[in-house]
Image (spheres, rainbow, N blue to C red):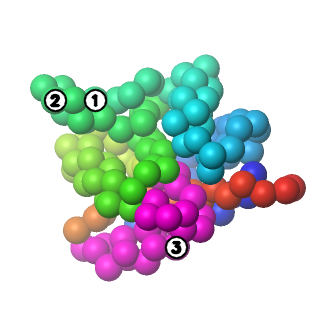
Amino acid sequence: MIVEMVPLNGYSGSTYDDEILDLIKNLGIGFRGNSTDYRKAFEEQLHHLGWAAKYRVIVSSNVTITSVRGSIALCLQLGNIARIFYDVLKLQYLYRSGHIDRAIIICPIQPIENRAYLNRFVKEVGCYNEIITVPLLAVGIEEGDE
């Protein structure tokens, strides 16, 4: 698994960054064939590491993100490109309400059909840095031979 990291909005790192990178590199399952299986395996490993299961952004709703641990939120986005910006909206809400102080977003490095991908995400988030202020670590993943 190839991993590329891009810190945004002053992201200064966290004690869990290496843990997440190790999880990605050692998961042993690809995301291209079946992203549902990848998500399930990823979330199971997160849980074993002490990350909360799906985190409800607003208690009175079913709006969730992938996980939270301490003051760090994490979103895994392998779906439609529009969904990654919805994740950013949820992360910004958690940041502004004081629930988190930084976030990690994981998506493919290269475009696959109309799915979210790193280069487009980084470019477009940069256009809104007066509005999107949550410190983010954008992590791109790509299946490959290492």
Disc 1 residue crowd, few under 14, some 14–19, many 20+, Cα 10 Å: some
Identify the residue under disc 2: 61
Q: How many numbered marks does the figure carry?
A: 3
Q: What's the magenta region?
A: 105-130
Q: Is residue 82 above or below residue 120?
A: above
| In this picture, residue 76 sits left or right of residue 1 | left
Where does residue 39 sit, x and y in percent of width and height?
Answer: 53, 36
Q: 10 and 4: which one is in front?
A: 4
Q: Which mark is residue 119?
A: 3
Whether residue 135 is visible, yes or no, is: no
Where does residue 50 sit, x and y in percent of width and height?
Answer: 55, 22
Q: Is residue 71 magenta?
A: no
Q: Mark 2 falls on what kind of element?
A: loop
Looking at the rendered structure, the kind of residue marked 3 is Asn
Contact, CB < 8 Å: mark 1 with mark 2? yes
Disc 3 residue crowd, few under 14, some 14–19, many 20+, Cα 10 Å: some
Residue extending furthest left?
60
Q: 22 and 102: which one is in front?
A: 22
Contact, CB < 8 Å: mark 3 with mark 1? no
Report the mark closest to the observer, 3 or 1. 3
Q: Earlier in the sequence, mark 3 or mark 2?
A: 2
Looking at the rendered structure, the kind of residue marked 2 is Ser
Q: Which mark is residue 56?
A: 1
User: How far is disc 1 from disc 2 in space, using C-alphas?
Assistant: 7 Å
Q: Earlier in the sequence, mark 1 or mark 2?
A: 1
| In this picture, residue 126 sits left or right of residue 93 | right
Disc 2 residue crowd, few under 14, some 14–19, many 20+, Cα 10 Å: few
Q: Earlier in the sequence, mark 3 or mark 1?
A: 1
Q: Is residue 108 magenta?
A: yes
Residue at 59%, 37% in the rendered image: 38
| In this picture, residue 27 sits left or right of residue 77 | right
Q: Is residue 50 above or below residue 96?
A: above
